[in-house]
Image (cartoon, rainbow, N blue to C red):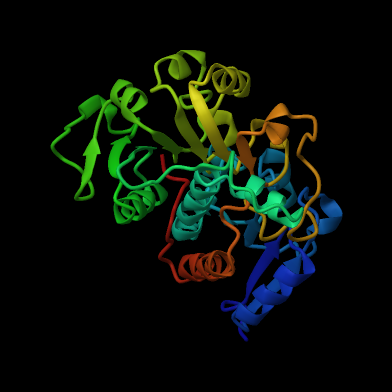
Amino acid sequence: MTAQNRLSVLFSDIAPADQAALQQRLPTHWHAHFVQNERLVVSDVGDEDTEVLCVFVRTRVDESVLRLLPRVRLVATRSAGFDHIDLQACRRRGIAVCNVPDYGSASVAEHAFALLLGVARHLTQAHERARQGSFAYRGLTGFELEGKTLGIVGLGRIGRHVARIALGFGMEVLAYDPALAPSLDITAAPIAGVRVVTWEQILQSSDVLSLHVPATQATHHLLDGQAFARMKPGMVLINTARGALIDEAALLHALEAGTVAAAGLDVLEQEGDLSPEVPTGCGGLGCDTGWSASSPLLTHPRVLVTPHVGFNTSEAIARILDETISNIAAWHAGRLRNRLDEP
């Protein structure tokens, strides 16, 4: 192995099982250093010639971290989200940044329907009743998806996958995307059978509203008290995106008022610093930190909550690892993929 071919990569926030899976995939000329902690300190740096820092969403990459690694020229995150990386700091140092934008479209979209079907057919209550030996069906009357109107907020990869599934169920599909709103062309639907509408129309017309936009300053509390007040009464809310999209106090009020009949949530705003995608970190899958057990949404009888597991399929995790290695290899070959650091 020549010095020119050797590539030194530091992987942070790595659990033993994930490290083993990565090691099976790594090219032989890479020199890999693994750190289980998400917060890097001097003792974690290891090889002072490290050229690539590979992180997960709990590792904050800022000036203080970059100073520990003066030779780093690529930050590769094993996630779609990248708000844990100071892109401006990387630009100032000439460090490229890349992510994994499309590892879990199917996984998250399918989980959105798992939540929707669970809410529609009262699966949690029905399962508990059966476990207790009762097969009484009264009080468990559900509703069909066929013929209902699904409103999709966000027409990225996941939103489009949700639309295709919904059409298979025989639902009418409306879509709104904040990025498309300024030049809205209702005749230009991105998927056959999907009708692009305004924000006001999607609130007023949806029997089910499913959120698929990132958490940004513009989308913070996108669903607030005013938005809930304009919704079709008795609608069902599904959120597999980010908890901060919803004002949870306003959601609780809407549930009590009947504006929202039920909700299926894979995310809560008070997840704290818990990683929103966790194939690595927290000692691996199954973290038991970050959730507030006192949250009224967790115990509400018409809310089905899962602990941010929409991404969590074996296929999606494998894609994260494979795509991350491909990103690093492409950068090493001079053709960076999934680049984030450009203005």
In this orientation, which residue lies closer to the viewer: 199 or 284?
Answer: 199
Q: Is residue 10 above or below residue 265?
A: below
Residue 69 vs 227, above or below: the answer is: below
In the image: residue 304, left or right of residue 294? left
The front one of 98 and 288 is 288
Quadrant including the C terminus? top left
Tell me if 179 is positioned left or right of 246 in this view.
left
Picture residue at 76% right of the left edge, 51% below the top: 38
Q: Residue furthest left?
A: 187
- Where in the figure is residue 135, as x and y percent of width and height? 65, 53
Whether residue 306 appears in this view of the structure is no
Judge whether 274 appears above or below 78 on screen: above
What is the total number of numbered labels drawn onto the structure image? Answer: 0
Q: Quadrant of residue 8?
A: bottom right
Picture coordinates of residue 84 (x, y %)? 62, 42
Residue closer to the observer: 206 or 340:
206
- Work out whether residue 10 can be spotted: yes
Quadrant of the rendered image containing residue 25:
bottom right
The structure residue drawn at horizontal position 30% and vertical position 43%, both measured from the top left corner, is 147
The image shows residue 94 at horizontal and vertical percentages of: 52, 48
Instruction: Judge whether 73 appears above or below 155 on screen.
Output: below
In the rendered image, the quadrant that contains the N terminus is: bottom right
Residue 227: percent from the left, percent from the top? 44, 18
Furthest residue toward right? 43
Q: Which residue shows up at 78% across the image and 61% down it?
A: 35
